[in-house]
Image (cartoon, helix red, strand yellow):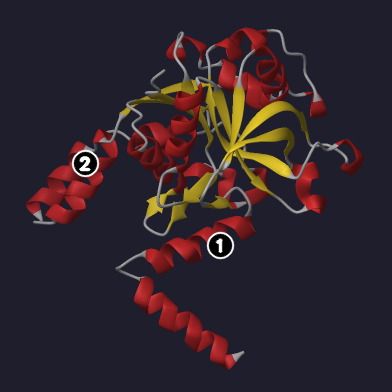
Amino acid sequence: MKVTKAVIIAAGFGTRMLPATKTVPKEMLPLVDKPVIQYIVEEAVASGIEDILIVTNRAKSAMDDYFDYTPELEERLERAGKFEELAAVRRTADMANIFYVRQKETKGTGHAVYRAKRFVGDEPFVVSLGDDVMMAEVPVMKQLIDAAEKYSSSAVGTQLVPSESISKYSSLKVSPLEGRIMRVTDMNEKPRPEEKFSDYAILGRYVLSSEIFDILEKTAPGYGGEIWLTDGLRELCKRSPMVAVDFDARRYDTGNLRGFLEATIDFALQSPDVGPWLRDFILGKAKKL
């Protein structure tokens, strides 16, 4: 199996980041010098993905515009001799083949993925949440794709979370396979402490077979009245092989203020342009506390 397509779910309302997200999609909030979603697109491209579908809603046309050419701006930059800025602007439009589809009703992550059925066809594909950003030497999508291709299976990204936090995630029932890879045999969405399978949570990255679409089509609404991708995955792992990859990366949930600020600081510190300045600025502030 070869994975060349990715689906990015970016159709949520961003309620955890209001009022900033009232008119600006949370995926378009600037993380240092790029919007959040560009980091996810770049991760996909670095993982060998060629075609990307972004699932949006009617309030998020800014993403369509961002990954398009901007002739007026580009002409002005060229006339001003700002060729470095011009290259950066053009690069956003040339990174990959990017397509869009709207989730016309807010019915959950499973429904959002189902909207990608025509785009995916019969191929395996990557799914990524639009506000989960990863800092890793090897892209997390690539880590999952390698495992999925090796075992001819679907794959989910996972890490251990604190026991008291597992009720915020999907809990996995796993058994060791090799290294950081485990076999998945069951899972549940936002379990109570007595219902959890383990403290391994699914965290924002998946490689799925197209079989998931037949399952999601028949999946009934679950927790909160929404169609959850986890409910579809639970059936998928019982029908065909699935592995969990304890991925090697630092994950940031930029859909909430604390996660967004953590990501901003960490990525800024890694920047050759502002990293040294920010380090000195933080140390100077700390001395005054």
Residue drawn 57% across the image and 46% down it: 21
Q: Residue 164 at what x, y percent from top left?
A: 82, 52
Quadrant location of the N terminus in the rendered image: top left
**Label 2 crowd bin: few (<14), some (14–19), many (20+), radius 10 Å:** some
Q: In this rendering, which labeled residue sits more in front, label 1 or label 2?
A: 1
Residue 93 is marked as none
Real-space Cα distance between discs 1 and 2?
29 Å
Q: Can residue 218 be seen at all in this image of the molecule?
A: yes
Question: Is 158 placed above or below 83 here?
Answer: above
- Residue named by callout 2: 90
Q: Residues within 10 Å of mark 1 (few under 14, many from 20)?
A: some
Residue type marked 1: Glu
Q: Position of residue 7 (x, y in %)?
A: 48, 26
In the image, farthest residue toward the bottom: 288
In the image as oriented, which residue stretches furthest toward the right? 194
Residue 6, by quadrant, is top left
Labelled pair 1, 2 in contact (Cβ < 8 Å) = no
Q: Position of residue 121 (x, y in %)?
A: 45, 9
Residue situated in front as seen by the camera: 76 or 90: 90
Disc 1 marks which residue?
262
Confirm whether residue 18 shows in the render: no
Q: Quadrant of the C terminus?
A: bottom right
Residue 98: % across, % down: 35, 27
State which tag comes first along the sequence, 1 or 2.
Answer: 2
Residue at screen point 62% across, 14% down:
240
Mark 2 belongs to which amino acid?
Arg
Residue 157, picture quadrant: top right
Number of numbered discs visible in the structure rendering: 2
